DNA sequence: CAGATTTATATCGTTCACGATGCAAAAATA
DNA sequence: TATTTTTGCATCGTGAACGATATAAATCTG
């Protein structure tokens, strides 16, 4: 009784941790042919929405720090997906812009979300649990991110 | 319209990925004094429930592969939390057992779950979203883990 | 305007997550 | 029993996360 809460099955965080891993894993078969990883896909999503952003804006969007994002962008630059140029108004900034290759991937990635939705829906049966998930996660994220 | 689904805000996986990161981060201030990381805490949870398990059972429980768990256990052995001994009935197995130090941590970790619950509840306001989260995540995990 | 502070980015070290691969022991099958 | 297959564990390499720290530019303050 005393240690009841120290049980794996009682812990929300373990579920989040596992669900996140498995979901990212589900993207793998779609992202592999494009030669990108899931975090790289996230960066592309941000840049496809709006190109030419400084590192800090991308980091904010992804809720990551620059010490995670910088190496990520460096790897993506190396693989030819984007460029990092010095900012003009603020020379501390590095403006990240898509290359042709990075832009072109958008077309190839277009169907990934629906493929994945279908994939997950098929395995989960009903849509219901999924629709409750999103607002609950948003609230959790909002709570945990404020400081 | 065509690219509507390629928006970060529309993606469940990003929420899971972020929520998991932030939640693990919330454990940090509690686990740091104990000198363990979150994945190491998960291993301890499993061993506190039942000591002396082979590597594969721990891996199954955490839904991880041995190529993740083995180095994790090696680090934990190095820091004196557990021992890995050869199995007797099946010599391929490595039986993982808690040391005194590993066992003793249970007492210190006892209040972590309630501290965290309180922490999260305070930031989220209502309990409602949290209670819907758990079964939804379970179903998602179940769907994604079957193969 | 000089000095202090903040901001934007980068680097380093450690720990994970995981695909690929290797190897030996156990189990299944011929 | 001999051969094949499976299982349990380990190693290696790569890419992330993230704490700590560094550096220069921008901003704020006295």
Image (cartoon, coloured by chain):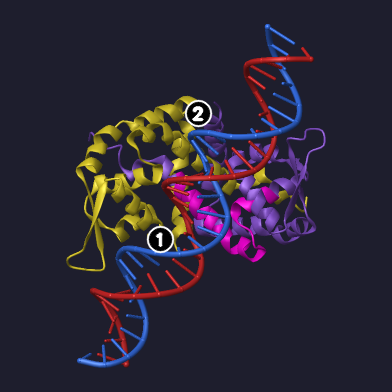
Chain colours: A purple, B yellow, C red, D blue
Q: Main secondary structure of the magenta part?
A: helix
Q: In the image, which residues are magenta?
A: A16-44
Residue closest to the eye, A83 or B65: A83
**Residue D5 appears in which quarter of the rendering?**
bottom left
Closer to the N terminus: mark 1 or mark 2?
1
Per the image, label 2 sits on a secondary structure element best described as: helix
Res B118 label:
none
Report the residue at 58% width, 44% height from top.
A68
Q: Position of residue B117 (x, y in %)?
A: 40, 31
Q: Tell me which chain the residue with mark 1 is part of.
A: B
Judge if badges 1 and 2 mark residues of a common chain: yes
Residue B16 in view of the camera = no
Q: Is residue B73 left or right of residue A95?
A: left
Residue where numbered disc 1 is placed: B67
Q: Is residue B101 left or right of residue D27?
A: left
Q: Tell me which chain the residue with mark 2 is part of.
A: B
Report the residue at 52% width, 34% height from top.
A140
Res B124 label:
2
Report the residue at 55% width, 32% height from top.
A145
Q: Is residue B76 left or right of residue A114?
A: left
Spot the residue most to the left: B88
**Residue A102 appears in which quarter of the rendering?**
bottom right
Report the residue at 34% width, 50% height from top.
B75
Q: Position of residue B87 (x, y in %)?
A: 20, 64
Q: Is residue B104 left or right of residue A35?
A: left
Residue B125 in the image: above or below residue D11: above
Q: Position of residue A86 (x, y in %)?
A: 77, 41
| Residue A26 magenta-highlighted | yes
- The crowd level at tag 1 (other Cα within 10 Å; few <14, some 14-19, many 20+) is few
Spot the residue most to the right: A88
Q: Position of residue B72 (x, y in %)?
A: 37, 52
Per the image, label 1 sits on a secondary structure element best described as: helix
């Amino acid at each position: 009784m005393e240690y009841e809460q120290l049980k794996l099955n009682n812990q929300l965080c373990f579920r989040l941790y596992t669900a996140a891993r498995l979901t990212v894993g589900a993207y793998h078969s779609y992202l592999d042919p494009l030669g990108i990883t899931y975090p790289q896909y996230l960066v592309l999503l941000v840049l496809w929405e709006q190109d030419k952003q400084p590192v800090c804006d991308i980091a904010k969007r992804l809720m990551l720090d620059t010490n995670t994002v910088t190496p990520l962008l460096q790897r993506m630059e190396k693989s030819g997906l984007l460029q990092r140029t010095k900012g003009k108004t603020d020379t501390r900034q590095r403006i990240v812009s898509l290359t042709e290759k990075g832009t072109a991937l958008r077309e190839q990635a277009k169907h990934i979300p629906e493929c994945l939705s279908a994939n997950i829906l098929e395995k989960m049966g009903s849509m219901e649990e999924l629709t409750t998930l999103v607002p609950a996660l948003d609230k959790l994220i909002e709570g945990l991110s404020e400081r």
